[in-house]
Every structure is written in structure tokens, then in C-alpha cells.
Amino acid sequence: MSAAATAFPPLLPHRVHEVCGPGAHGFAVIQAALHKGGPVLWIGARHAPERLFPPGLVPVLDPSRLIAVETRSETDLLWATEEGLRAGPLALVVACPDKPLSLTAGRRLQLAAEAGRTTGLLLVRMGAGSNAAETRWQAAPLFQDAGGQEWSLVKNKRGAHGTWIVRWDAKARSLHVVSASGERAGLAPLAL
């Protein structure tokens, strides 16, 4: 594995992370594919304009691993997220809150993730993150590189920040981290 691939930080297990930006849903689907060992719980609001379409995930994630839940309110969404994190046997819990989380709500989710030994990922609007989040990512599609995304780690409680160009290889079902300018040419697969 190249230096570019080893420098890419995975989501720290048993913690809650955030992602924002126009590529946030793609980031979340790829993270769901990378988190093996159980089903993925995806929680969204029933009234949200962006809704999950499981058949569209086939190139990245087997829809049979997906448990999709739609909630009626923000309170229900936070409750379902906390219960999912605390439940334990899930590979990943993804939630799409409408409003910024309070520090108390963010801390409750962190405690639930630790108790259930489950990793959480919240899709938040730009500037609407919680201080309780372990990491915050910005994800954006690269229109000049079909299928490519730029992932920037903009908040990290335990380490450095950085930006990576990534591409999902549907045939190999793997994530490739593109080397930075001046490093080894080509793609470096990230072990799953």
C-alpha cells in the first residue's frame, strides 16, 4: 500500500463523525461499504427533499445490508440515531438531521456510539456541525473526474487535517486514493 493510502484516515470506530458538502451522500455510501460486519442503519426525515434510493446504491453497497428508516420529526430522528448507535450489531449508523445538533445532543450520540461499539456518521449542512463530533469532513464531487470526489478532513479531535482525491472502483468494490501531485502516479487501493 502506498503512502497516500496509508495516510488516509478511516473513521475512528465507536465514535460519531460528520460530513457536509455536495458529496456528503456519496461519502456516506462509500463509508457504509467500507464498514463491514453488519447492516447499515440509514435514518432520514420523511419530509426531506433528498431521499435514499437503495437500488441506486448497487455499484457501491449491497442494498440487502441497508435498513432505511424515515422519521416524522427531528426528535424522532435523534432518538432513532441514539438507539441505533446503542444497539450494537450495526456496522454503521448514518443519520441526516435537519438542524444543527446541540452540544448535549452530540454528546449523547457519542456516548451511545461508545456503549454500542458502533460508528455513526451524520450528514450535516455546511456550518451546522456539532462540537461533539470526532471528525468533520467536507465532500465534493470532481466534475472533471467522473466518479471522483475530494474529501477534506476539516475537524479532527485526534490528529491532522488533510485533503484526499478518492475514486470508487465499482468492479473491484474498493476505494482508491489518488496520489498527491509529485507522489507515485496512479491509484493506490485502500484495503477494505
Image (cartoon, rainbow, N blue to C red):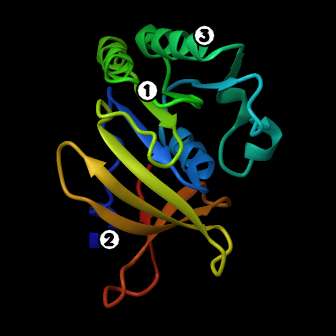
Q: Amino acid at mark 3?
A: Asp
Q: Nearer the viewer, residue 132 or 166?
A: 132
Residue 28, quarter of picture: top right
Q: Disc 1 on helix, strand or loop? A: loop
Query: From the viewer's perspective, is residue 21 above or below residue 72?
Result: below
Q: Amino acid at mark 2?
A: Ala
- Front label number (2 vs 1): 1
Q: Amino acid at mark 1?
A: Leu
Q: Which residue is mark 1?
A: 101
- Badge 3 or badge 1: first in the primary sequence: 3
- Front label number (3 vs 1): 1
Q: Disc 2 on helix, strand or loop? A: helix
CA–CA distance in space, label 2 to label 1: 33 Å
CA–CA distance in space, label 3 to label 2: 40 Å
Residue 67: x percent and y percent? Answer: 67, 21
Q: Nearer the viewer, residue 97 or 163?
A: 97
Dot 3 alpha-carbon crowd within 10 angstroms: few under 14, some 14 to 19, many 20 or more = some
Residue 40: x percent and y percent? Answer: 58, 27
Q: Disc 3 on helix, strand or loop? A: helix
Q: Nearer the viewer, residue 45 or 84?
A: 45
- Badge 2 or badge 1: first in the primary sequence: 2
Q: Which residue is mark 3?
A: 76
- Badge 3 or badge 2: first in the primary sequence: 2
